[in-house]
Image (spheres, rainbow, N blue to C red):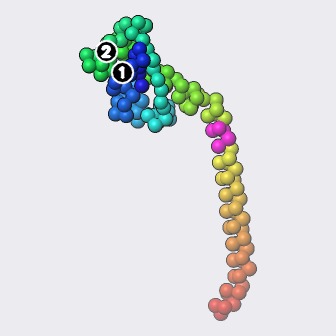
Amino acid sequence: MIFRDSLRVLPYGRVDNDFFQIEERRSWNAGRYYWSNRRIFGYIGITQSSNKELKDKSGREGFIRNQAARELKTIISNLLTELADRFFGSRSDDRKELLEQVKREKELRKSAQQQARKSTQKSFSEALKNQTPVLDASLE
């Protein structure tokens, strides 16, 4: 939600408004653009005196699309992208550590499955060898 001088600027913050293109970016690449409307909430507080170039539309239903509005949108979008990359994306140290751990666990499971499969095949082959004379005798 965006507030100017403690008054909410509509329609920003409504469920059907994606001013910062959060959902659109997520549809491009959910791994890189981590944020979605379900995962984020926030408050952007600005003042008229500090942001003279941000002009309200006549009915206070958003900002006039000028350079200042485009810059605000770009700054917030880049901030969200950078935070997602740093803490959740491929540049995240936590992600790298976790990914290595997951890979090690996967390799251990795969190795255990292969050993179990070999053991099962070996016991089946031995049982088959032991039963072959009995089967041959019953066929005669």
The numbered mark, 2 or 1, whose residue comes first in the sequence reads 1
Q: In this view, does 94 lie to the left or right of 13?
A: right
- Residue 128, compared with residue 68, is above or below; it is below
Instruction: Find numbered disc 1 in the image and state the secondary structure of the residue it sits on.
Output: loop
In the image, is residue 57 part of the stretch drawn in magenta?
no
Q: Which residue lies furthest to the left in this view?
A: 58
Residue at horizontal 39 percent and vertical 28 percent from the top: 13
Q: Is residue 120 left or right of residue 13?
A: right
Extent of the magenta region: 98-103
Q: Residue furthest front?
A: 6
Residue at horizontal 33 percent and vertical 26 percent from the top: 11
- Residue 6 seen anywhere in this rendered image of the structure: yes
Q: Do the residues labelled 2 and 1 touch (CB within 8 Å)?
A: yes
Instruction: Find numbered disc 2 in the image and state the secondary structure of the residue it sits on.
Output: loop
Distance from the alpha carbon under mark 2 to that under mark 1: 8 Å
- Residue 54, compared with residue 26, is above or below; it is above
User: In the rendered image, which quarter contains the N terminus?
Assistant: top left
Q: Quadrant of residue 118?
A: bottom right
Residue at which label 1 appears:
9
Residue at horizontal 69 percent and vertical 82 percent from the top: 132
Nearest to the observer: residue 35 or residue 49: 49
- Residue 42, compared with residue 126, is above or below; it is above
Residue at which label 2 appears:
56
Q: Position of residue 35 (x, y in %)?
A: 48, 32
Q: Position of residue 51 (x, y in %)?
A: 40, 9
Amino acid identity at mark 1? Val
Nearest to the observer: residue 59 or residue 66: 59
